[in-house]
Image: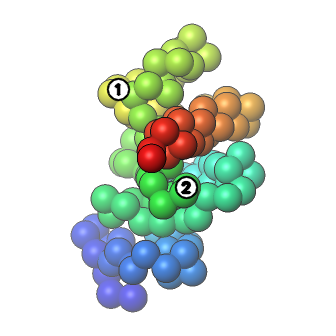
Amino acid sequence: MAGGRRGEPTEPTEAPAAASAWIDAYLAGLPSDQRVALQSLRERIGAAAPEAVEAVSYGIPAFRYRGRPLVWYHAAKTHCALFPTGAVIDAHRVELTGFGLAKGTIRFTPDHPLPPDLVRNLVRDRVAQVDAVLDQRP
């Protein structure tokens, strides 16, 4: 794979195996504390939404569910982030006290990661959002 911006691998095609390989390379290029935090997050997302497939979207790791974006995650210089959508964040705002929040973004650090139960609940709520939209279609 050729390198992307800041030494990241270039974005793969939509094939899940290519996306997983890209994500492996992305994580391998991170400092160890961020790599461990995001690998753990990746595993928890996959466990909470086993039907979801890994993808790359907007140049960062993501999961897709039923052909739709589910969640994204990435590492920045001073934090890590999970992007589940603003509505999911609003529904869990009390549980997210102590984490940096912005529209659609939850910021955390490797030494203060998102609790496993919270990740599971965020992802399951996002799955329910996608299901609600797709199940209403004619």
- Residue furthest to the top in view is 94
Q: Position of residue 6 (x, y in %)?
A: 28, 67
Q: Which residue is mark 1?
A: 102
| Color encoding of the figure | rainbow
Q: Which residue is mark 2?
A: 65
Whether residues under marks 2 and 1 lie with C-beta atoms below 8 angstroms apart, the answer is no
Residue drawn at the location 74% of the way across and 52% of the way down: 47
Secondary structure type for disc 2 = strand
Q: Quadrant of the N terminus?
A: bottom left
Can residue 28 be seen in this snapshot? no
Identified by mark 1, the residue type is Ala
Q: Residues within 10 Å of mark 2 (few under 14, many from 20)?
A: some
Q: Position of residue 117 (x, y in %)?
A: 74, 31
Quarter where residue 7 is shown? bottom left
- Residue furthest to the bottom in view is 1
Nearest to N terminus: mark 2 or mark 1:
2
Q: Position of residue 125 (x, y in %)?
A: 60, 32
